[in-house]
Structure formats: C-alpha cells, structure tokens
C-alpha cells in the first residue's frame, strides 16, 4: 500500500492505543467533555472496581481484554449493559446515580457488576450501536460545503457502519445550520445544533439515493434491538430518546436501505456500479473506522483512490468522515473529493451527538 494511503488508514484509527485503565480514564474525560456526567460516573465506578480480586467474570473479562480496549469501546460496552439493567427496572439500586444524586458509585456499580455478570457478559461481545440522528447534521453541512466547491448538489449517499440506518433517513429531516436551512418543511425531525463560526454555504440539496451497510444491522421494528440502541444512549441527553422514537416511527413507515455486509465489500461493490451524471457519489461514516479491521480500511482507501482517479466534474466522488479524536476528546468532520481532491479538509469540530458544531470550513 502506498505511503499516503497508509497515512489515511492510520489517521482513522489513531489515538486509540493504551491499556484498559487508560481506556476507562479517557472515556471518563470524553463523557465529561461531551456533557455526560452520569455516564462518566458509571465508567469511573467500573474502573475503580476492575482491580478487585473477586470482581467476577464480567469485570475480569474487561480487565484481561485481549484487544485494544479504547478502539473496541470496551468502557461503553460495559456502560451500555449497566444502563440496560437500570432501564429494565432490574437494578433499582442504580437509581440515585442515574438521577444525578449523590451516591457511593463504586459500591453500587461494583455490586451490580459482580452479581449480574451473567446478564452483562453479552454486552462485551460486540461494539456499541450508537446510531445517532444528530450526527446527520455533520453530513449535511459537509454536503453544503461540497456543493459550494462546485460539485453537484444531488447526492448518492453510501454509509458504512450504518447500524440501524437512522442517518440513511437524512433526507426526511430538516436542518438549521447556522441559519442555513435544508430539508422538507414537514420533517420527521428537525436539528438546529448550536453553531459556532461562520455558516456553511447555502445550497439546494437533493438525494438520488441513500444506501448503507453494517456487519450487524439493527432492525428498528424489533423492540429488543431498538431497546439495545436505547441502552447505549447517554441518559443525560434526553432528547436523543425522543429522536430514537421518531426514527423508529419513520422506519416503520419506510425502512432505510440497509444491507448486512462488511464495509470494504460494500464500498467496492457500490463503487463498481454505474454513476448517474450530475450526481455526487459520497461515502460517509460516523464513529465507525475504529471498529473496521485494518485490512478493510486499506481496501476502502484503495477503492476510493481508484474510483477517484476516474471521477469527472459531472460524476464526482466525495468522502465525508466524522470520526472521534481521542486526543481532543471530540469529533472532526473531514472531507475529501475528486477530481482534484488530493487532501483532506477539516471542516468542523463537533459534539459527539450533534449538540453543537464549530465550523472551520
């Protein structure tokens, strides 16, 4: 693989090293920085009991994690399981923490983690499904910027790691991005993130299609699967529960175009299909690349580079990446496009779930 391609793939996975203790400490800081003090308390309490000799199977498995715990989002897997127990009513002892009241977090969480190891163990089997509609504001802002660069404002969207496909319904949402309004008047949801900086370019956007993939797609029509998504919502962000309910209703009316497939296979398959003239084909993803194996990341870069070399002004290709920066404890919105797009452009910094966007573009 060429050196510049290696730089791209390394950049997507950067900042996720360290051991279990470092992963939990980073997640605590990350939650606090993104307005999630309750989730930070749960993660901190779990970290405090990891070293106990009689911690039980659940905590022992975390302590002996064989992979890269931060990239694997182990703290959030564990916190999701704890939240699910609370939401089910099975562990009322957690109530003071989730109510934001003073409590002995370490004792409460440690007791639950030990007693409920059997219930919690499955939550460690796969990455969190944090499908958040608010992140679609980042995608739309980036598309406005691309249109401002002269690319066609009609988009064929390809999303990898699409989870339940909530962001594949972006065309049904309305946005107010620094005063620039996009989307249908009678929308499923409306997003108006707190805007910092100049507004993005104003442009008319439309969608030729929105398709996505996930290795373990979530069916919003299945109450159990929707409940799992709900457990991963940080409880402080109450508006996100309403958004999930709205997304479920929208999916029941017309399901998003979502297939079970790994990211590299999907990208290669879709890029091989004919592209409509006057349409910008765009690959997009949010908080995904840390979970994609390195060989797949390399394949995706190669596929995009190859397709980009064949792109033309009437059939351009773009790439929108909304990924975590664990050093800055936030997210960056980056874009690259072809023809002529040899560099990544950092357009914005953003809140983890779309509460604010700091525009740099």
Image: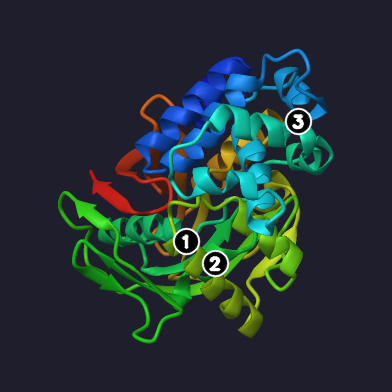
Q: Tag 1: Cα neighbours inside 10 Å, few (<14), some, or many (≥20)?
A: some
Mark closer to the chain start, 2 or 3: 3
Give the image quarter of residue 162.
bottom right
How packed mark 2 is, by other alpha carbons closer than 10 Å (few <14, some 14-19, many 20 or more), is many
Secondary structure type for disc 3: helix
Disc 2 vs disc 1: Cβ atoms closer than 8 Å? yes
Numbered mark located on residue 240 in the image: 1
Q: Quadrant of residue 17?
A: top right
- Image x and y of residue 128, in percent: 64, 45
What residue would you read off at disc 3? 114
Q: Earlier in the sequence, mark 1 or mark 3?
A: 3
Q: Who's the residue at 54% across and 67% down the image?
A: 244
Q: Is residue 315 visible?
A: no
Q: Which marked residue is nearer to the observer: mark 1 or mark 3? A: 3
Q: Give 116 or 148, whichever is nearer the viewer.
A: 116
Q: Work out how far the residue at label 2 is from the one at label 3, CA to CA, in angstroms.
A: 31 Å
Looking at the image, can residue 338 be seen? yes
Give residue 141's mark.
none
State the residue at coordinates (71%, 73%).
221
Q: Position of residue 237 (x, y in %)?
A: 43, 55
Residue 65 rendering spot, x and y as whole percentages: 73, 21
**What's the CA distance linking mark 2 and mark 1?**
6 Å
Q: How is the image coloured?
A: rainbow
Which quadrant holds residue 118?
Answer: top right
How packed mark 3 is, by other alpha carbons closer than 10 Å (few <14, some 14-19, many 20 or more), is some
Say which of marks 2 and 3 sits in front. 3
x%, y% of residue 143? 36, 60
For marks 1 and 3, give the CA distance: 30 Å
Say left or right for 290 vs 55: left
Q: Which label belongs to residue 244?
A: 2
Looking at this view, name the residue that lies furthest to the left: 198
Nearer the observer, 52 or 240: 52
């Amino acid at each position: 693989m060429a050196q510049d391609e290696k730089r791209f793939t390394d950049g997507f996975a950067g900042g996720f090293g360290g051991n279990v203790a470092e992963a939990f400490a980073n997640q605590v800081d990350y939650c606090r920085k993104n307005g999630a003090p309750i989730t930070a308390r749960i993660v901190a309490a779990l970290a405090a009991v990891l070293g106990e000799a009689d911690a039980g199977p659940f905590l022992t498995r975390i302590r002996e994690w064989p992979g890269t715990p931060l990239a694997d989002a182990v703290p959030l897997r564990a916190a999701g399981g704890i939240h699910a127990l609370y939401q089910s009513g099975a562990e009322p002892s957690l109530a003071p923490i989730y109510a934001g009241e003073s409590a002995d977090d370490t004792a409460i969480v440690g007791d639950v983690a030990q007693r409920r190891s059997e219930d919690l163990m499955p939550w460690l089997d796969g990455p969190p499904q944090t499908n958040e509609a608010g992140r679609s504001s980042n995608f739309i802002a980036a598309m406005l910027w691309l249109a401002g660069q002269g690319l066609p404002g009609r988009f064929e969207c390809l999303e990898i790691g699409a989870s339940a496909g909530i962001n594949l319904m972006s065309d049904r949402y309305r946005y107010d991005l620094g005063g620039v309004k996009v989307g249908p008047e009678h929308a499923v949801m409306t997003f108006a993130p707190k805007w910092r900086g100049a507004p993005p370019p104003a442009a008319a956007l439309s969608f030729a299609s929105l398709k996505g993939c996930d290795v373990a797609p979530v069916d919003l029509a299945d109450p159990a699967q929707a409940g799992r998504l709900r457990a991963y919502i940080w409880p402080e962000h109450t508006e996100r529960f309403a958004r999930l309910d709205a997304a479920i209703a929208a999916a029941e009316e017309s399901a998003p175009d979502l297939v079970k497939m790994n990211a590299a296979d999907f990208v290669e398959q879709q890029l091989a299909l004919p592209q409509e003239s006057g349409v910008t084909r765009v690959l997009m993803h949010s908080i995904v690349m840390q979970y994609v194996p390195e060989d797949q990341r390399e394949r995706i870069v190669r596929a995009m580079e190859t397709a980009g070399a064949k792109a033309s002004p009437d059939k351009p290709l773009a790439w929108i990446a909304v990924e975590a920066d664990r050093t800055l404890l936030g997210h960056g919105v980056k874009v690259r496009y072809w023809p002529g797009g040899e560099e990544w452009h950092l357009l914005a910094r953003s809140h983890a779930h779309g509460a604010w966007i700091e525009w740099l573009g």
